[in-house]
Image: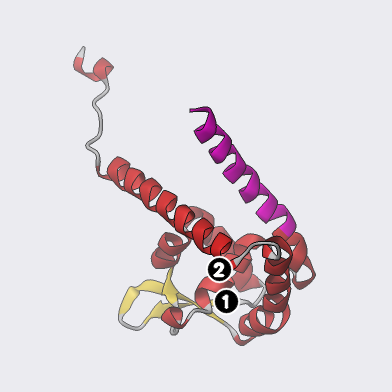
Amino acid sequence: MELANRLFFRLYQCANMLHKTGSRAIEDEGLTTQQWAVLGALSRKQADGGMSIGDLAKYLMVSRQNLSGLISRMERDGHVAVLPDERDRRSRLVTLTQSGEHVWHVLARPKILNYYQEILGDFSINDVTHTLHYLLKMLENMQRIDDDWLNAAPIANPADSEQ
C-alpha cells in the first residue's frame, strides 16, 4: 500500500510539474499545456478534417464542459475553428486554422521537442519504452474502472424508500 501511495503521489506531482514547466516552455506562443494537447490532437493525420468536440474530449480524457471553454478561447485566438459537421449538422467539428497550424508546427513544436529532450535526455530508449508501457497499462486499468463506474446502475438512496 505504501509503495502504491508513493507511485500515485509521484504521478500527481509529475502532472503538476508537466503543467507548470510545460506551460513555461510554450508561454511565448501564448499557449498552455491544455492548448498544446488540443493542437497536438488536431494535428494528427487521424484528425484531418477535424474532430467532434465529443471525440476530442474522449481522446484527451477531459470533460466536454472543460473542453468547451478551452476551445472557445482557442477559437477567439484564431488557433481553431468550430464548424458544423457536413455529415451530421447537429455535430460540430473542431479544426486547426492556418494560424493554429503555424503556431503548432513552426512555433510550439520545436520548443516542445526541446522540452522533451530536457526531461528525457538521460533516459535510454529502453527506459522510455518501459515507462510508456507501464503508463499505458495503468491508463487501461483506470479506463476500465471509469467505464465500470459509468455503466453501473444508480444506487438507490435508502432515505427515498422510507417514505
Please identify the residue farthest to the right as the structure is shown.
28
Tell me if mark 2 has few (under 14), some (14-19) or many (20+) residues whose alpha carbon lies within 10 angstroms of its own.
Answer: many
Task: Kindly tell me whether residue 163 is visible in this rendering.
Answer: no
Determine if the magenta segment contains residue 5. yes
The amino acid type of the residue labelled 1 equals Val
Q: Nearer the viewer, residue 35 or 145?
A: 145
On residue 38, which mark appears? 2
Determine whether the residue tagged by mark 2 lies in a helix, strand or loop.
helix
Left or right: residue 163 compared with residue 90:
left
Q: Tell me residue 48's x, y (percent).
A: 45, 84
Q: Which residue is drawn at 70% across and 75% down?
A: 108
Q: Which residue is drawn at 34% across and 43% down?
A: 145
User: What's the magenta region?
Assistant: 1-21
Q: Quadrant of the C terminus?
A: top left
Colour logic? secondary structure
Q: Do labels 1 and 2 touch, CB within 8 Å?
A: yes
Closer to the N terminus: mark 1 or mark 2? 2
In the image, residue 133 sits, relative to residue 113, either above or below, namely above
Q: Which of 68 and 31 is in front in this view?
A: 31
Determine whether the residue tagged by mark 1 lies in a helix, strand or loop.
strand
Determine if the magenta segment contains residue 130. no
**Label 1 belongs to which residue?**
80
The amino acid type of the residue labelled 2 equals Val
Q: Tell me residue 31's x, y (percent).
A: 70, 67
